[in-house]
Image: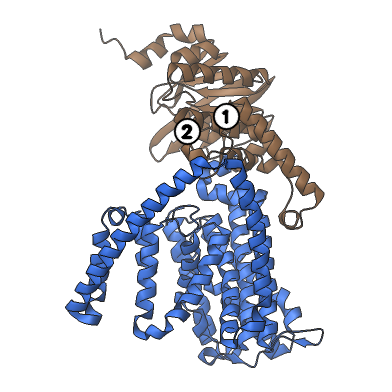
Chain colours: A brown, B blue
Amino acid sequence: MYLLEVRDLTKHFGGIKAVEEVSFKVREGSIMSIIGPNGAGKTTLFNCLTGLTKPTKGKIYFLDKDLASLPPHSIVKLGIARTFQNIRLFREMTVLENVMVAQHSKAKSGLFGSILRPQGFIDEEKTIKEKSIEYIELVGLEDFTNTIAGNLPYGSQRRLEIARALATEPRMVLLDEPTAGMNPQETSEMMDIMKRLQEFGKTIILIEHDMKVVMGISDRIIVLDHGIKIAEGLPDEVRRDQMVIEAYLGKETH
Amino acid sequence: MAGNELRVTSSKNSIFKARPILVALWFSILFLPFKGAKAALILFVVLSTSIVLSRSLLSYAKSLREKGQAVSNRIRTIKLSTRSLFVARYSLLLILIALPFFVRDYLLDIAILTGIYIILALGLNVVVGFTGLLNLGFVAFYAIGAYTYALLNTALGIGFWPSLPLSVGLTALSGFVLAVPALRLRGDYLAIVTLGFGEIVRLVLNNWDSLTKGPNGISGIEPPYLMGISFWRLSNYYYLILIFALLTIVIIKRVYSSRIGRAWIAIREDEIASSAIGINTPMYKLYAFAFGAFWAGLAGALFAGKMQFVSPESFTFMESVLILCMVILGGLGSIPGVILGAIILVILPEVLREFQLYRMLALGSGLVLLMIFRPRGLFGGKSVSLRS
């Protein structure tokens, strides 16, 4: 079953064609990687999928609902979560609070609930806290629960971002360069986390530059160059594709 | 004056930290026009030596404390401190309740004013401290609350209690109305829009003679009555303010530590990330504006009931700045900090009253000093910065 279907997605910034008529489908429970040189439009594609930018043209169907006109918070509610290339944590909040706040749309209590504190409110807060701790354990940050997020080492910040994304209880997670700037040890830990997510039935779309990661865990790969999809297929097919090699290494001139 | 503080802190000036002499020099230059070169020189010498001395004393105390911490058992100290906090809280409450029995009316008057400002500052803290939206026109909401009660009472003869929900509701609504166009703006631009809003409200009050009696103001407002008790007596009004201030503290604290409060803080920290985890950011910004304005409306109605007179003069831009100073001084986002900030900024000018001419200068330079040495405010939550 296809969870996500993107049809002729186009995004222009003035005269710049960041994404040009890109179409693809993502099967539920699979890991799909998007690769391509810098400036190929990968992050713009993510921004369109999560509602942070409105596409110029095209349709995005998630569970047969069109996302193109929805605001970001409604898209999260439907079940898409993401991380950012340049980590965007709530730096002054603790690790626990970062994950707790991500369960915002799952909770229901309003203003009067929080003032009068009926049993329902207390129970809800307790569940949020317990679940948050589960997500923190999932990414291996249980020793830093009460650390201020901005004080975490770089690799842990990336993991916290994943825990935060998971706390929205998504069906699909978009990871924007989750291993950027990591050493080999941290990278392989991150790959383990991604595999675990797949075991939990999460669908993953991954932007990644590290070919070892891409070839190691992807079910399918899409290659973007200058906003255009130049190849799609299984890792082995993409690896041998002439267009892909040219995009990465340049054309032979003779 | 406020501009100064904000600028100093937003650049988190560490030059002053490193070179206390510069601080002393700055102050003596500030005082030069008042007292001449000789006095400025003396001030410079005294200040620089006292700063150097106090700094070395502070670092000595810090090293002592660190030693002490290493020795004592951590868990025991935490337990003790929560218990002492409990004791401190209730003895403070007892003192506050007993206050009217042993202080003069003048002090009670200041206490009432402090209570009103605590409510105001806590309300502004929701917008600026929690949500990170700089509001320079907060006094407009204070004015709307005060004038609503004043008009309902003098024109229609409605008492304090029935008009309270009306004036508070109208103020919250006006917060909502201001927030709608302001939602698209951030940081400095938002600050300018709110500044404009504050001025518009004041000018309307000043010029709509047929309704507000213009600059003459509205007099003859009734103080509240409740079950035969008049709150005209100062000590009764003091208790009224005390109850409302405590209610404000409890409610804001509870909202802060709920899903709504977390959403506000998240918006302050990173708006894009907040929307990407499912927070309806425009809605929660509206919420913050209306909720903050709500408290200003309450403070306004209480103010009108206390003074029995309102005029546009009480709601100038300087008043907005003063409330903002309370929030920043105490520490953006910190509830006890903001309360302390309000107390200091109401009481300090009264204490300094004897110094007449130098009052505002001393107050202003005191604020600057505090911002230099504690850039995050007394209770330091988020660092003070104009950008959201």
- Please state if B4 lies on the left or on the right of A169 as rendered: left
Residue B256 image offset from top left, x and y in percent: 63, 54
Residue B269 image offset from top left, x and y in percent: 51, 47
User: What is the secondary structure assignment of the residue under circle 2?
Assistant: helix
In this rendering, is residue B186 above or below A164? below
- The mark nearer the N terminus, 1 or 2, is 2
In this rendering, is residue A28 above or below B175? above
Quadrant in which residue B1 is drawn: bottom left
* Subunit bearing disc 2: A
Q: Which residue is drawn at 47% across and 81% down?
A: B350
Q: Are marks 1 and 2 on the same chain?
A: yes
Q: What residue type is labelled 2?
A: Thr
Q: What residue type is labelled 1?
A: Leu
User: What is the secondary structure assignment of the residue under circle 1?
Assistant: loop
* Subunit bearing disc 1: A
Question: How many residues crowd around disc 2 within 10 Å: few (fewer than 14), some, or many (20 or more)?
Answer: many
Is the residue under label 2 in contact with that under label 1 (CB below 8 Å)? no
Question: How many residues crowd around disc 1 within 10 Å: few (fewer than 14), some, or many (20 or more)?
Answer: many
Q: Which of A145 and A159 is in front in this view?
A: A145
- Please state if B385 lies on the left or on the right of B34 as rendered: right
Residue B337 image offset from top left, x and y in percent: 53, 61
Residue B261 image offset from top left, x and y in percent: 62, 52
Front: mark 1 or 2: 1
Residue topped by disc 1:
A141
Q: Report the number of numbered marks.
A: 2
Q: Residue at x 66, y 66 (%)?
A: B91
Q: Residue at x 68, y 21 (%)?
A: A200
Residue topped by disc 2:
A44
Instruction: Give me the C-alpha separation between circle 1 and circle 2.
Output: 30 Å
